[in-house]
Image (cartoon, rainbow, N blue to C red):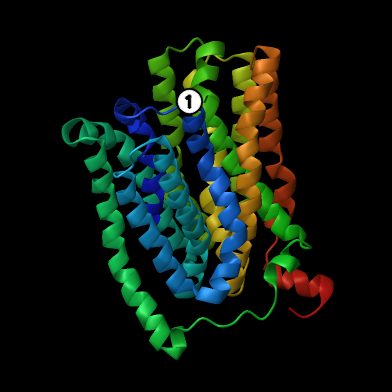
Amino acid sequence: MAATLRIAVASLSPVIDRIDRDFALPAALVGLIGMAPPAAFAVMGMLTPAIERRVGLERLALAAVAVGAVGLAARALAFDAWSLFAVTAVLFAAVGVGNVLLPGIVKKYFPRSVGAMTAVYTTAMTVATFVPPLFAVPLADSLGWRLSFAVWAAVGAASLVPWVVIAVRARRSPRDAIEGPRVDVVRRLVRLPLAWALTGTFAVNASVVYAAFAWLPAILVDVAGSSAEGAGALLALFALVGLPCTLFVPLLVARYRVIRSLYAVAVGGGLVAIAGLLFAPAAATALWVVLLGLPPLLFPMMLVLLGLRTRAHDTAVATSGFVQSVGYAFAALVPLAIGVTHEITGDWTVALVILGVVIAMAAPAAVFVVRSGTVEDEWERRHGPW
């Protein structure tokens, strides 16, 4: 499921130029497609908990995987720019649903192995981010871009099989049935500092990732004197830093609770990277890029904490929806702010300062997140029984 969701995002951009040979893709529409992931994730983050309460965790997961598989195949049938955009928007909506559900799925089915299972699916996500860019263009050149999309759809189709079994079993077995919601969790979350601290941490991670993929190559060319090819390789290095993080961070958080240290590494590394790009960009460019890749370790940490900072899977789903909707909405604005600032000032100084301020936001959030306990515990301390 995790691989299917990430393939949906990673398999399009490498073949945009091939698609443009068959029908025109206006630059504005390509820009809309680029903005679609965080926008769709933010919207579905708000809607998914309410849908899950009515439909059930397993059936909604099955629907998300099914729409993902069908959407991947349907992109191969696009006949103009707007049909491609429409299918992609629906596909990203399914991805947004899956993003919210995964922590709740782990919480329900693997309550004693939250760290290990989070490491498994975040690693699957990371691999599914690297693989499509490596093979999408060769597939498109040899088979055509339409069949290239169809190849990725096969992954989604394969992931449908176990989810059909799980959904049927959950419907027939009272033990696996979804319990009805006891409270309006989201209304309570907005009153809890812990929920906002989790949200702020997620927003920092997403902002750094989207800002880097949007602007890091241009920044490196202008301030560090990198070539276009070198800047692209450094962007790949930035992404590669996340692979060991997805493997080890969930286990470190779940087993050893080294949350404070991980915050220090993420925030400290990110701020040193910003300082390096501001004051000595060409002195150790690769080192600054590696350090800038450290704040995204907050992503696997957050996915584990969505399980550890909640008691029940329905609370985990609601908290995941709240955190991701606000976090992705904020993250969608940061690359825009960086671009506008660069356009106004003509250099990258203020833009890098903005990114540094965003990274620093994780520090006050850490004060609340490092404390043990769940959102239910915090509510009960402040407001009475959950």
Q: Is residue 5 above or below residue 357?
A: below
Label 1 element class: helix
Quarter holding the N terminus?
bottom left
Res. 313 visible in picture: no
Q: How many marks?
A: 1
Quarter holding the C terminus?
bottom right
Instruction: Please tell me in which quadrant of the rendered image residue 12 appears.
Output: top left
Q: Amino acid at mark 1?
A: Ala
| Residue 374: % across, % down | 67, 68
Taking the view exactly as shown, the residue that stands out farthest to the top is 225
In the image, 384 versus 44, the foreground residue is 44
Q: Residue at x 59, y 47 (%)?
A: 262
Q: Residue at x 36, y 62 (%)?
A: 66
| Residue 205: % across, % down | 58, 43
Q: Is residue 9 above or below residue 293?
A: below
Q: Residue at x 28, y 51 (%)?
A: 153
Residue 119 as seen in the image, left or right of residue 302: left
Q: Residue at x 62, y 24 (%)?
A: 339
Classify mark 1: residues with Cα within 10 Å, few (<14), some (14-19) or many (20+): few
| Residue 40: % across, % down | 54, 49
Q: Is residue 38 above or below residue 236?
A: below
| Residue 142: % across, % down | 16, 33
Res. 79 visible in picture: yes
Residue 290 as seen in the image, left or right of residue 129: right
In the rendered image, which residue does mark 1 sit on? 27
Q: Is residue 315 above or below residue 275?
A: below
In the image, 344 versus 260, the foreground residue is 344
Residue 224 as seen in the image, left or right of residue 381: left
Taking the view exactly as shown, the residue that stands out farthest to the right is 383
Taking the view exactly as shown, the residue that stands out farthest to the bottom is 174
Taking the view exactly as shown, the residue that stands out farthest to the left is 142
Instruction: Please tell me in which quadrant of the rendered image residue 183 appears.
Output: bottom right
